[in-house]
Image (cartoon, rainbow, N blue to C red):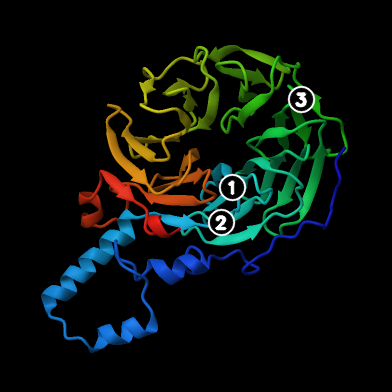
Amino acid sequence: RAIHGRNEAKLRRQDSRRQAGHGVMADQEATTEAKVEGGAPATPATQEAEATQPTDDAQEAAKEKTFQKVQYSGPMVCHGHSRPIVDLQFSPVTKDGLFIVSASKDGKPMLRNGTTGDWIGTFEGHKGAVWSACLNAPATLAATGSADFTAKVWDALTGEQVYEFPHKHIVRCVSFSPDSSKLCAGGFEKELRIYDLTKPEADPACFPKQGSAFKCAQWSMENENLIYASLASEGGVAVWDVRAMQRAAFSFDTGKDIVTSIELSSKDVVTTASGNKVSFWKAETGEKVKESYTIPFVVESASLCEQKNYFAAGGEDMWVHLYDYETGKEIAQNKGHHGPVHCVRFAPGGDSYASGSEDGTIRIWTTPGAEGESEDSQASVGTTEGAGNGGE
């Protein structure tokens, strides 16, 4: 049953209107702006010394060129989580801007500015690892699924817990319906539940119990009647019909490979990661858009941006890879994470993409050719190393 209006969980905010601050994080600010690859952070003493040294136009131009390359080539590094990040999601662009929510094994889901990476607040109240986090379309509500046997809904503006839905086992995945009136939740109970947020005290509707735990679930943002879900010990993606409360007539066949990531990339395309393959499916029929791409490592997450014609993938090799969607050619190898990459997602429009890792950091990478990217950064596409890799 739902617990309504609890005030135990307050969102620690930087300001009441959820406006972004300056810099990714305080410790990142202190080092990133003045850092040149292989160099050290600037201090007042070094800045004063530099000011007294004569420089000519050529030296100034070279210095500016190096700074620009670091600024655009390196990612924004978002610290804050103390344990691995297992899920993240961008919001659509809203009247208040772009946001990103993250789930971590530290049990403290966080909300950030999706453009700058600045921390906005932490949803406090879970007593176990948080496996899933999502925002509704206007980014006014957040939902989380946790190892504390609960799914929670939060007010994303105030941070207050709105509803708590208890389960009998770990909750691995949560997703809002397109109109935000319902929430689906699944996990180790081996069943997918549908909660009516307009009647939170009512018992949830439940799909038939499955043979293994639910691993991923995504509600279609175009068709309110369809939910895409994968299981922890069976390959493929099952499509569930909310009207009939049973499986739809089609599914996505990935063979024996467990699907570890499902993304509604557009109204027509669903992107999945399974084994060492990234696949693209027609959302309404289950047919393949094209043949799957085989990746030379175990893929945990993948994301497609049709506007930029790129897809990104991350997994066990600890890098974030960018590929050409039409040819499958690798465009960039983004180094910097110090553990497997568990989640990758493009921002709306595709000018950037974010990755979350076992190392507890989120990194926001600039997409080649994105608006505002310098010529130097475009020329350096290939292998990108995150600023401060060695010292973190």
Q: Is residue 95 visible?
A: no
Give the residue drawn at x 40%, y 19%: 289
Give the residue drawn at x 64%, y 60%: 121
Q: Earlier in the sequence, mark 2 or mark 3?
A: 2
The residue mark sitting in front, 2 or 3, is 3
Q: Where's residue 256, x and y in %?
A: 52, 13
Query: Which residue is label 2 attached to?
Result: 112
Q: Is residue 155 left or right of residue 321?
A: right
- Separation of marks 1 and 2 at Cα, in angstroms: 8 Å
Q: Earlier in the sequence, mark 3 or mark 1?
A: 1
- Crowding near the residue tagged with mark 3, few <14, some 14–19, many ≥20 C-alpha atoms within 10 Å: many
* Circle 2 SS class: strand
Give the residue drawn at x 65%, y 65%: 13
- Residue furthest bottom in the image: 52
- Identity, as a three-letter code, of the amino acid under mark 1: Ser
Query: Which residue is label 3 attached to?
Result: 189
- Identity, as a three-letter code, of the amino acid under mark 2: Arg
Q: Are marks 1 and 2 in contact (CB under 8 Å)?
A: yes
- Identity, as a three-letter code, of the amino acid under mark 3: Glu
- Separation of marks 3 and 1 at Cα, in angstroms: 23 Å
Q: Earlier in the sequence, mark 1 or mark 2?
A: 1
